[in-house]
Image: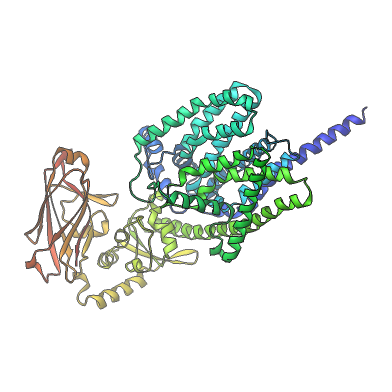
Amino acid sequence: MTLQRPAREHRALSATAVDALWWLLPVSFLFWLYRDAFATWFVADDFAWLSLFRQVRTPHDLFFELFAPMAQGTIRPWSERGFFMGMEALFGLNQLPFRVVAFATAIADLLLIAWVTRRASSGTAGQTSEPRLAGLIAGILWTANTALVRPMTWSSAYNELMCPLFLLAALALFIRYTETGQRKFWWWQLVIFSLGFGALEINIVYPAIAAAWILFQTPSARRAPLLRSLAPLAGISALYFIAHRIAVPLPATGYYTLHFDMSVFKNLALYCKWALVPEPMERFGHRHIVVILTFAIGAAAVAGYVVTELRRRRFGVLFGLSWFSLTLAPMLPLSDHRTDYYLTIPFIGIAVLGGCAASRYWRQPPIQRAMLAIPVTVYLCAMIPVTGQVAHWWRIQSQAVRTVVLGVIAAHQTHPGKAILLDGLTSDLFNLSVSHSPFVAAGVNNVYLTPGSELSIAPMPGLVDMELVVPPAEAIWHGITHDEVVVYSLESDRLRNITEQYSRELAGHLVDRLPGRLVDRLPDRVDAGNFLFSWLLGPQWLPPFSGVRWMPGRASLRIGVPPGGKTLELDGICPESQLLAAPRHLIVLVDGIVAADTRIYDPEATFRRLFPMPGVLAGKKTVDLEIQVDPVDRKDGQDYGLVFGKIAIRP
């Protein structure tokens, strides 16, 4: 007897170790496949979120930054605002802690996917032989999908990892409630579900996911009371939807406009394809025929398994399809913004489906095992190389962004108070960095591109006004000659100061383009909020802030006239509170001649006006503008008339 007990304990420990291995294999695969993510720096939208921390000075500011609608009307206090502000407060611009949190969240997702799949594989669909295999395969399938690259490498997509954590955790608690009847699990589910709204709006479909579990994974005799238990959750989802629509109306224009037309079905077909075939597969060197064959094999396997299960009246298979459909549905009307990382959450349903299929067919005759092994192998052979390549590509791109941003911060410390011009940026690097104002997060302003950069850079539509990023050559020349500007060029993995070399090139360019004395050159555009143009503004103007500048009731400026200059352009802002009190009367004089006499009415808080230049001024190279506005607001002894951004004379 004493010999049998150690033997039993040894077998129990061995079984525990083997079971732990089943859980840890997908986690190890995650670390291996996304190893490049740990060195991937911030890009694009990350910088908008990183700038929030500098805007928090009071508890009211914190509440506003956490819960005010932002970025297409989203309200995601945990997965975006709180995540970025908390991590930046603790670690600054060090990307590694951000990635560690992302990996920790993905690991939690993986473990929950495996747990739910184990339950689904051994539920009412019929007892299967190896639920551990079901959890393993589900985790591997989900991890390998290229949809995960952006959430794993891009902090702005962290919501795609946090949201399934809430959905899966709530579902796991609900499953425990259905198994044990203990109300504590139901209440904890309610708490987790409610908190999930702070991660991503897709959380709204959770009651439908729980209902799908009841319908397809629980005995029919218990379905009615369990479905009734979901009524409070459905009510919360309905209230959230109504409140969100009141606070944030649906966008009528832009990428996030909803299209309820036939494009929904096209989008569905596209996402179904991306679920089985890497979206960038052809861009990474694979032939089109390989893409078609990969999709055909995967689609045939999914359809064959589903049809077989339904013919045998094993309806548990519909849970995975329900998850996929329910979590994908909110994305389908976004015809102008289709991206593969939107599949991160929906693909969990396909992964569960694949795990259940593996569990069912693993110990079947060889032909049936082949029906499982072949499509899984084809899927992994297609996904794994492309996923690794895409993750590596993002690492390389982000390192170039890191070089630029940290290089600018170092240049700012070396040349405090000076504007920094960047030379030699590519379109990709510009769109991932400068176009998103990355330097604001580090407290660095007045960073621009060298004149002429706009000719070689193709900015993404709607992101940035290139004129505000590329000052006129005449303004740059004045800044360089008055020691207000330094110029840096991107070379390999660093920024190099090329101010002297660039000043010689710029002088030659200006002489060739406009013969005459350089000191007499005035730009034909004045960005009022840019200190590089302050020498052109009269003393009446208030100091610049956030790229714009207030004027009182009257202000003046000097500006150059381009050859054939015929139109005066004024871009500005008039706060709604002022316009509600009274329209603004705007008068513009050019060299003392009235060129504009107009009114600004509500709701033109942001206005743009075009006026013809007086004909008597034809041939002049410079003019003096005087802008008058009435009425003005007076606060703390200072008059406030209008806010101006761009003032220009166009051909």
Foreground pick, 531 / 249:
249
Instruction: State whether residue 116 is above or below residue 569.
Output: above
Residue 229: quarter of image: top right
Residue 150 picture location, percent across and down: 52, 51
Q: Is residue 457 left or right of residue 18?
A: left
Camera sees residue 567 = yes
Foreground pick, 182 / 107:
182
Foreground pick, 85 / 192:
192
Disc count in the image?
0
Residue 593: quarter of image: bottom left
Which of the colour schemes (rainbow, by chain, secondary structure, one colour) is used?
rainbow
The C terminus: image quadrant = bottom left
Q: Residue furthest front?
A: 311
Instruction: State whether residue 166 is above or below residue 560.
Output: above
Instruction: State whether residue 160 is above or below residue 559.
Output: above
Residue 197 picture location, percent across and down: 47, 35
Q: Is residue 394 left or right of residue 115?
A: left
Residue 159 picture location, percent across and down: 50, 43
Residue 81: quarter of image: top left
Camera sees residue 108 = no
Residue 384 picture location, percent across and down: 63, 56
Residue at x 74%, y 50% (from the top left corner): 368
Foreground pick, 156 / 399:
156
Residue at x 64%, y 56% (from the top left corner): 297
The N terminus: image quadrant = top right
